[in-house]
Image: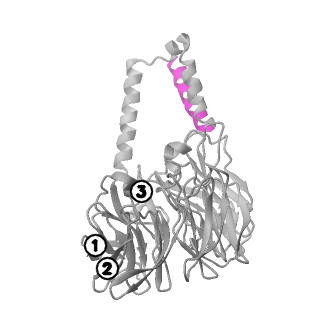
Amino acid sequence: MRLQRTAALLGLLVLWLALGPWVFLAALGLLAVPRVRGWLRPTRRVTGVLAAVAVALTGLVLLVPDGWLPVPPGPGALVTPGYVGRPAVPRPVAAAGASSPWAGPLGESPRVDSAWYGLASCAGIAFDGHGRLVGVCGSGREPVLQVIDPGSMRPLVTKDLPDRPDGDGDGAAAWDELCGRASYLDDRGRAVVATTDRRVLVVATEDAEGDPDLTTAASHDLKAQVPAGDCLVALHPDGRGGLWFATARGRVGTLDARTGRATVLDLGEDVANPLAVHGEGAYVVTTAALYRLGRDAAGPTVRWRAPYDSGSRRKPGQLSQGSGTPPTPVAGGLVAITDNANPKMHVAFHRRSDGGLVCQTGVFADDESATEGSLVAVGSGVVVANNHGYSGPLSTMFGRSTDAGLVRVDVVGGKCVVRWTSDQAAPNAGPRLSRANGLLYGYTKRRSWWGADAWYLSAVDVRTGRAVFSVRTGLGPLLDSHYGEVAIAPDGSAYVPTLGGMVRVRDRDQG
């Protein structure tokens, strides 16, 4: 009897992993039958063994260092495809913005690996001169700066950063998702990080021998420029050895890294997106307008201001009521953003010289358009991903996904032309273009009537919008990227930060 009962429970677990959560619901229905319930009723000894196993597994998870275990598998492996499409033929393109100079995976017998960090994720990752991953990671309100081994995806060194405070008022979204997450690597491979206590840290990521290390090289206190109740949400190098910064409450400033001198301009409008720097100017999109900023001896100045339709509400899929994209310079002297209009948001192109609107066009279906990822610049156009419907991990659980769509919009003869559309659903991750092979990589999710939550790295031909291949990275809510972005490594691997850690996809010939 005991053997039969054990076999039944193990069989139920196998079916759950293979077919998805409906198996669990069916099992609950069977428990309504008194005879089945009586047959499965465990003895005290069995209950004790199960409790001991649960405690042991919990202790193992807590004691094992981050990255030593793969992300736990979710249900639905047999009812979701592992691979769709065929290998790509590389066709390089000229592009800028959210793109990588390195060639990503082509879909040749791709291999997927993962590393579990508990309930921790990385805001974004960059690659140092040794190909190691550097990013601001952590769980909840406890961010850390980490250098991560690209092979094992295990953290090599970790530096604690100030905790994130609670959000307040209408800036809660910026506090929860953006405060203390902005960072980049400077031209010396050092991490430049915005902290929640209104400082900018410059942190060396290696020691004199080239081994991973996190030592603070400089700390710039901006409390005089950024008052309490505000926080840094964007950093961008200025090309002069300094940087531009922006705060959630709309203060935009410059910092001279050599002297530590900081100057600031209060725009009076909230900011929830990264900055763009092009030439001598910086571009910032607030919840009301697109700005081009310059600077003089006194500090930042407004060169022009271009209002846009910020809508009447914050849509599911965006962190603020306004544009969900940072400004993106494109060819032809233009800069592109999206607005927050209803029933459709628009992709809008402005002249960089004076802010004049060149053209705009609505994208995606009525009442099904929102985005929170960077636009991908390709020639005189951009690609935008639809994130409408994503309000957190629950919105993509139990086989659900968000409103689908990738769209490429080009400026042709002064008019906006929709070049192509794709039905790929990318709930929250910003796509990344590989200039070396012409593939646009998105982190996608398919709807499943089985309730299976399968996530995919999907490649689209940026010229035509044709879906090339999709490879399943895993199943379950821990594979949700939650506003993480696809990153292409120098060795051709693709990395995606997720709620439970990190996944990597690489071709067979990459080892």
Q: Spatial distance from mark 2 to mark 1, Cα to Cα?
A: 7 Å
Report whether residue 139 is seen: no
Query: Which SS type dominates the magenta stretch?
Result: helix
Please name the residue shown 61% across and 33% down the image.
15
Q: Is residue 249 magenta?
A: no
User: In this picture, which residue range is highlighted in magenta?
Assistant: 1-18
Q: Spatial distance from mark 2 to mark 3, Cα to Cα?
A: 25 Å
Q: Residues within 10 Å of mark 2 (few under 14, many from 20)?
A: many
User: Image quadrant of residue 29?
Assistant: top right
Q: In the image, what residue type sits under mark 1?
A: Gln
User: Image quadrant of residue 336?
Assistant: bottom right
Tell which of 412 and 443 is nearer to you.
412
Task: Report helix, strand or loop for mark 3.
Answer: helix
Task: Report helix, strand or loop for mark 1.
Answer: loop
> Label 2 belongs to which residue?
263
Q: Spatial distance from mark 3 to mark 1, Cα to Cα?
A: 22 Å
Return the disc, 2 or 1, that comes first in the chain's sequence: 1
Return the disc, 2 or 3, that comes first in the chain's sequence: 3
Please name the residue shown 53% across and 11% down the image.
34
Q: In the image, what residue type sits under mark 2?
A: Thr
**Residue 392 screen position, x and y as percent:** 49, 47
* 397 relative to 169, above or below: above
Where, quadrant-wise, is the C terminus in this rendering? bottom right
**Residue 186 screen position, x and y as percent:** 41, 79
> Label 3 belongs to which residue?
177
- Residues at marks 2 and 1 touching, judged by CB atoms closer than 8 Å: yes
